[in-house]
Amino acid sequence: MNKNNLIKTEAYVNGEWISAASGKTFEVNNPATGELIAAIPDMNREDVRIAIDAANEAWHSYRDLTATQRANLLKKWYSLILENKEELANLITLECGKVLQESLGEVEYGASFVEWFAEEARRTYGDVIPAPTNDKRIVVIKQSIGVVAALTPWNFPLAMITRKVGPALAAGSPVVVKPPSETPLTGLALAYLAEKAGFPPGVYNTVTTTESSEVGKELCENRKVRKLSFTGSTQVGKILMNQCSSTLKKLSLELGGNAPFIVFDDADVDAAVKGAIISKFRNSGQTCVCVNRFFAQDKVYEEFVSKLSAAVAALKVGNGLDQGVQIGPLISKKGLNKVKQHVEDAVAKGAVLREGGKEIGGLFYQPTVLADATSDMVIAQEEVFGPVAPVFRFSTEEEVIKMANDTEYGLASYFYTKDVSRCWRVAEALECGMVGINEGLISNAVAPFGGVKESGVGREGSKYGMDYFMEIKYICFGSIK
């Protein structure tokens, strides 16, 4: 590790690598082994204010770069990310525990946002609108919004940064990135590569801290921050939204989910099982679009449960750096305890344990399948964020749509069927921001990512993503003769 100097143990502010003013640090540990990886600056609200000031100062010159100049900087950053793919993937696995093959996929996925928004930088088109009178001309332009704060989660420590930072930098906005305390090293590595790509001092800043509440409050309440993008829990998202109200900041919030996965009786069950493994057990079930509730129709219920259980039994659990491992550790003891409690509650209320159901030392938990799940179980309403698949039974299409929508969340949904008419009916009836039809892996840079209800506000990625990092200005020319 660190052959390319990617492990940084200082924060990056205004083009300099610095420590916390207090001198405080915190430890970053490998969740698979518990071993210390590094000690990182533990910054406070005053440190972050300095980063915001630097970003705001850099904004005025950075926004004046041409779209092509900003695109070229992003393209260079994109190339450097891919050149360091293996080392970045190792770092992701060390910090968050996901298996190495998934980490390699995350680097490519994360880099794709940088490439996409490098291209979109030159496509922030405005409009000429026909005026109501002959003596006027109406023009609409899009401009950089200003300093962007990016608060990112531990489960995708690279891709969630690039998905937020890519459009901000493309639009001409400097950024202050606050990675999570569990996985700050990947964020610092990205800052190092951005520095090598040539972004001017102050344009790209990364602050590290365990004081998430106070630092987050500063990013929300500071008037120099014009936009905040957060990926994380609904509970924290509501707090940030409330704190941003004093300055009416523009917000992107990608929050919790409770994704349903529906298998209709005309589905290809083998394909559904394959999709279920991808959509449920990626990163040990610790992603926001992971399936939380499986629904199988009466005629295929037992076939689906049996085949899913067999596929789950074949998954290899272990250190994500070891060859052949498919399921890594949970991120923390708190996360492990939540998984255990959900399984215990479900079994106590009548669920049948068809596979797994035990912790196996450290932060590892067996991939688990629960049959005969019911709506009164905690796992039916709360995101388990672990490798547990509860399977519910249903009889009719109308019934399962009602069951799938019976949640305050609405991020992702999945279903399997061969009926084209049903594809349209169900996709339109599901209350969510994203739908996978006969597909368990739906995320990519060209599609809008986001949810409805209490799963968030706004969209990231795609051609729609730039608009959330820009301001629309209307210009009226009068007295035209």
Image (cartoon, grey):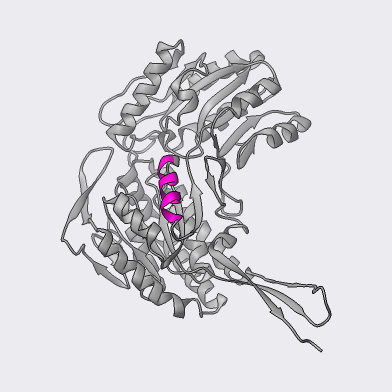
Tell me which residue sits at (45%, 31%) in the image: 383
- Answer with the quarter of the image where residue 479 lies: bottom right
Q: In which quarter of the image is the N terminus?
A: bottom left
Query: Would residue 18 appear left or right of 335 to someone viewing this image?
Result: left
* Magenta region, residue range: 235-245
- Return the residue found at the far front: 246
Does residue 461 show up?
Answer: yes
Tell me which residue sits at (51%, 74%) in the image: 70
199 versus 94 height, above or below: below
Closest to the observer: 286 or 243? 243
Tell me which residue sits at (46%, 13%) in the image: 351
Closest to the observer: 249 or 63? 249
- Return the residue found at the far right: 134
Place of residue 248 in the rendered image (x, y in percent of width and height, measured from the top left): 49, 59
179 versus 292 height, above or below: below
Tell me which residue sits at (51%, 53%) in the image: 252
Query: Would residue 56 appear left or right of 126 to someone viewing this image?
Result: left
Place of residue 198 in the rendered image (x, y in percent of width and height, measured from the top left): 40, 75
- Return the residue found at the far left: 23
For residue 285: magenta? Answer: no
Q: Quadrant of the C terminus?
A: bottom right
